[in-house]
Image (cartoon, rainbow, N blue to C red):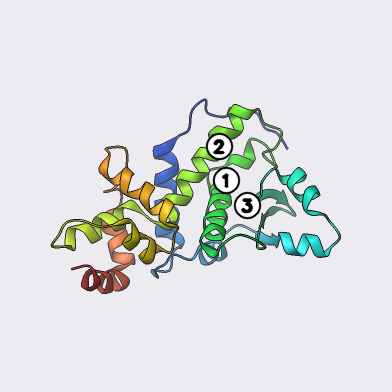
Amino acid sequence: MVCNMEIPETPRYQYAREKAIDTLIEYGNGVLPISVKNIIYNLPVNIRYNTFSNLLKSGITMSEILDTYKSNDGAVVQCNNGYCIIYNDIDKPSQRIRFTLAHELGHIVLGHLEFDGCLYRLSNNEYKVLETEANQFASQLLSPEPLIRDILKQSKARIIYANQIQNVFDISLESASCVIKRLKSKRGISSYKEGELHTLYSKPLKEIYELYD
């Protein structure tokens, strides 16, 4: 399915990040690390899963999977009045799988499949724009800057390290390092709906304050 909506010429960084926070506030359960599958379950959208291992059991080869979905991590497609997220559960660590699920959810929430039902008939530039937006969404969903800023405010040292972010939010050290860089820049959304996030995650935040005080 292709519609008449125009794909942005450049990634909508702020829009993608804020949509992630909005999604987290509306459908999150106040538990850390953040469960992407719980958010997906709470969404009023029909989203199913399939894994590379299941596809292989059905007789599809790995080369056919990669050729169809153009990714060694995962993909999302429209199916049966909803969506299906396919992800690599064979040779990817759990943190990478979590990011992949958040990334593919980003494509859904950001309306990317309204541009094209499977995202693989786009030009290279169009695809890159939508992939960047989905990455921004995933990063904010799994490790929201306003929550990290909240933790920083309660820390006497007023500093947080990448390995601490990694441990609290169950993301890779590489992803945590990117969060640190963004926090130090002026391009983040560190105060966006911070109060609402604080209320939702007050219980785990209290425990974290004690750990990093």
CB under 8 Å between discs 1 and 2: yes
Q: Is residue 152 visible?
A: yes
174 lies left or right of 191: right
Measured along the vertical axis of the image, is residue 212 above or below residue 135? below
> In this orientation, which residue lies closer to the viewer: 116 or 145?
145
Residue with the most extreme right position: 59
Q: CA distance from mark 1 to mark 2?
A: 7 Å
At label 2, which amino acid type do we have? Answer: Leu
Question: Badge 1 is on which residue?
Answer: 107
The tag earlier along the polypeptide, 3 or 2, is: 3
Please name the residue shown 34% across and 60% down the image.
Answer: 163
Side of 59 relative to 10 (left or right): right
Mark pair 3, 2: CA separation: 16 Å
Name the spot of residue 138 as percent of width and height, x first: 48, 51
Question: Which residue is at 32% across, 60% downward?
Answer: 197
User: What secondary structure is marked by label 1?
Assistant: helix
Task: Place residue 44 in its image quadrant.
Answer: bottom right
Q: Is residue 189 visible?
A: no
Neighbor class of circle 1 (other Cα within 10 Å; few <14, some 14-19, many 20+) is many
Q: Amino acid at mark 3?
A: Asp
| Crowd class of label 3 (few under 14; some 14 to 19; many from 20; radius 10 Å) | many
- Where is residue 213 shown, x and y percent of the image? 18, 68
Give whichever of discs 1 and 3 has the lower sequence position. Answer: 3
Residue 130 is labelled as 2
Amino acid, disc 1: His
Q: Residue at x 30, y 53 (%)?
A: 146
Q: Which residue position holds label 3?
A: 73
